[in-house]
Amino acid sequence: MALLERDLKETGVAEQVTTFESGNEMAAMAAAQINYHIMGYFPITPSTEVAQFLDQMKARGEHDIQLIAADGEHGSAGICYGAAVTGARVFNATSANGLMYMLEQLPVQSGTRFPMVMNLVTRSISGPLDIRGDHSDLYFALNAGWVILTARTPQAVYDMNIMALKISEHSKVRLPVIVAYDGFFTSHQKRKVQYFKDRKVVQDFVGECPTDYKFARDPKKPVTIGAHMNGEDLLNNHFQQSEAMYAAHDVFQEIADEYEKISGRKYEVLDLYKMEDAEVALFLLNSAAETAKDVVDQLREKGIKAGVISPNILRPFPAKEIQKALKNVKALLVGERADSYGGHGPNITHEVKSALQEDPYNSTVVLSRVFGLGGKDFYPQDAHVFFQMAIETMEKGYAEKPFDYYGHTPGNPENVLKPVIEPMHGDVYKSGLISVTPDEATGKLKVRIPPLRALTSKPKRLASGHGACPGCGIFAGLELFFKGIEGDIVVLFQTGCAYVVTTAYPYTSHKQTMIHNLFQNGAATLSGTAEAFFELKRRGEINVSDDVTFVMITGDGGMDIGMGSAIGTALRNHKLIILEYDNEGYMNTGSQMSYSTPLGHMTSTTNVGCSQAGKAFHHKDTAQIMASTNIPYVFTGTEAFPQDLIKKAAKAQWYAQNMGTVYGKILITCPLNWKSEDRFGTTIMEAAVNSCFFPLYEVEQGHTTITYDPEAKNKRIPLTEWLSYMGKTKHLLKPENKHLLQGFEEEVERRWQRLKAKHENPYL
């Protein structure tokens, strides 16, 4: 409850605002009030909102944090580390596979002892893919050398974020800090919270940014950072790091005591609920502990001495406090949202057991249950079951089954999955109406396709029933492209809208073989699939008479985080097609900016306000980048020009089967995030081409050919006509943004003139 003004003066507690906010909102609020120097970030559910909220606040002029959108989480970790070595205050937020992708960088940050704060919005690590919350990502961070704080509520997220920076920069610690809270349970659920009305209170509490360290900030004081060491020196380095980690235990309590004086909120190393005389207890991380507290009250009314333990700090592990808290407990159940496969119990279970092993007077029986994976809810009745297990163990004096999973169900052979749609292959995808032949004179391909009506008899590669948004252009574009592909395909979808809406276990919309892998590794994965297929066929270990076409589908920013994999695949020249559907953003995570987002366009991380007007730099020309790898065939296309796209698909198949890697980019609409009307999809695509924003061309064996010239057909339109169809670009048409529009127009014209020059000169 907010204190009265009289109470504030008497207690020293600073004035606070009471509101209802989520954990992600409170993480952003704390970061904005601290006013970090740098945030390097990359979108991933459910942590994405932190950057989105900060960008909205930045557009309103509420902080000065430099928000840097990386090409992937590995890049974001590098940005943060590079900023930290200058002595800047650095902030980040990530989840699940995002943490895994940056994992290589985490020990670099801690091993060289540079402070920063990162929010880990916990989520299940794939595979299989699941975007909801468990602690499988958090457990990978346990050995990274970072101090780890755990926050059970949105209020704790705010408070821990403020304390985290002060802990990180403390002279006895100087280590990066993770604030971990549960994805969706804490990150998105709104709860009653308090935050400091005056940001100066926060800034006074965290203090001035330290300068008494060897930072790479003054050329007149050169330093060497990260020099390699021999074994003896490395041993000493890690000993010092270990000592700093253990020092963080006392520093946490010291800073928490200071924070209590200005906030009125107390944080001990362990959050103990009715543990004074508890005989049975649950040990739970984060939000599940809050659920279990209500059950403790119910059991207490029945005379059962129950309690709950939940740590506020996980690294360093609070062993002594756990020993003390469990002194009289007869049975403890440790519930964990992750497993350490093959370890006869997850990580925290073993650490609790290890702590108790060092207490010769403790006789607590510990049992362990893995629960709540992939965001499976933890209800009060589940806590009741856990307590009942502990009570039965207490009564027996031993655990019948020390380790098990909770909530899993046995399979029933009678319920084996059966296909809902008939898989298709072979001749059903051969129309016989498309011919592709090399021209001996030019070396290029001649393509003949029938009228579009004749190709409608070819069945679709994807069945109806997918969950795409109304007006989504992905499947219209993909299916049109596939009309030009004859015979069987093996298709890999990177994570993105097209994957998410077509495959949700136990259902699939794919009639032919589909493989999924993550954003950053799709092309490499499919290259392995293709090479294995060809090698098995060569050895006679598989008997397939017809050729198979391998196609990787990417989009939703996949050619940002996946660019390295795609370029590597192209340089190796595997026989496959990389097809990008470009919707100009990371649409599957909520319309964040990607490098394909054009200048000035509004996304959820390039907001429009008094301090900024959409994306600040030009879009990446992926087709030209891929053409520079000298692969046999590169093309652009869109459903608004169907004959052009089908011809290019036929060429793509020939080159992929005979010469090597093909890259194609098709522009598709996203009415939801472009803020456009569903019915204008084809119109917008046509306008994008006729305005020369998205020219249609191909690069065939190094020679560029414009396949549709709006100027030659007297159909070129102003860029503003294309922009006028979309709500995300309406601000560009306002007088105050004339300079931004002019810069966009000049870049479009520059790229168009360069393309025309390449079309006219085969040596360019």
Image (cartoon, rainbow, N blue to C red):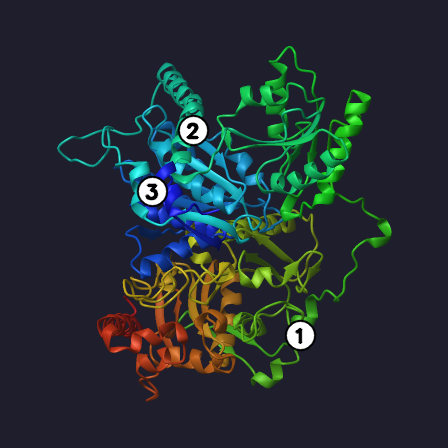
Amino acid residing under circle 3: Val
* 163 sits left or right of 677 in the view: left
Residue furthest toward the right? 414
Residue 451 or 474: which is nearer the viewer? 474
Q: Is residue 127 visible?
A: yes
What element does badge 3 sit on?
helix
Tag 1: Cα neighbours inside 10 Å, few (<14), some, or many (≥20)?
Answer: some
What element does badge 1 sit on?
loop
Residue furthest toward the left? 220
Which residue, given by chain and number where applicable, does mark 1 sit on?
459
Residue 78 location (% of width, % of height): 36, 42
Tag 3: Cα neighbours inside 10 Å, few (<14), some, or many (≥20)?
Answer: many
* 236 sits left or right of 459 in the view: left
Identify which residue is drawn at 30% across, 78% down. 733
Residue 739 or 511: which is nearer the viewer? 739
C-alpha distance separating marks 3 and 2: 17 Å
Nearer the N terminus, badge 1 or badge 3? 3
Residue 330 vertical position relative to residue 489 in the rendered view, above or below: above
Which residue, given by chain and number where applicable, does mark 2 sit on?
252
Which residue, given by chain and number where applicable, does mark 3 sit on?
202
Residue 34 vertical position relative to residue 461 in the rendered view, above or below: above
Nearer the N terminus, badge 2 or badge 1? 2
Instruction: Place residue 56 in its image quadrant.
Output: bottom left
What element does badge 2 sit on?
helix
C-alpha distance separating marks 2 and 1: 63 Å
Residue 49 location (% of width, % of height): 46, 54
Amino acid residing under circle 2: Phe
Residue 332 vertical position relative to residue 694 in the rendered view, above or below: above
Residue furthest toward the top? 360
Identify which residue is drawn at 51% across, 79% down. 678
For the image, the number of numbered tags is 3
Which part of the image, by quadrant, shows the C terminus? bottom left
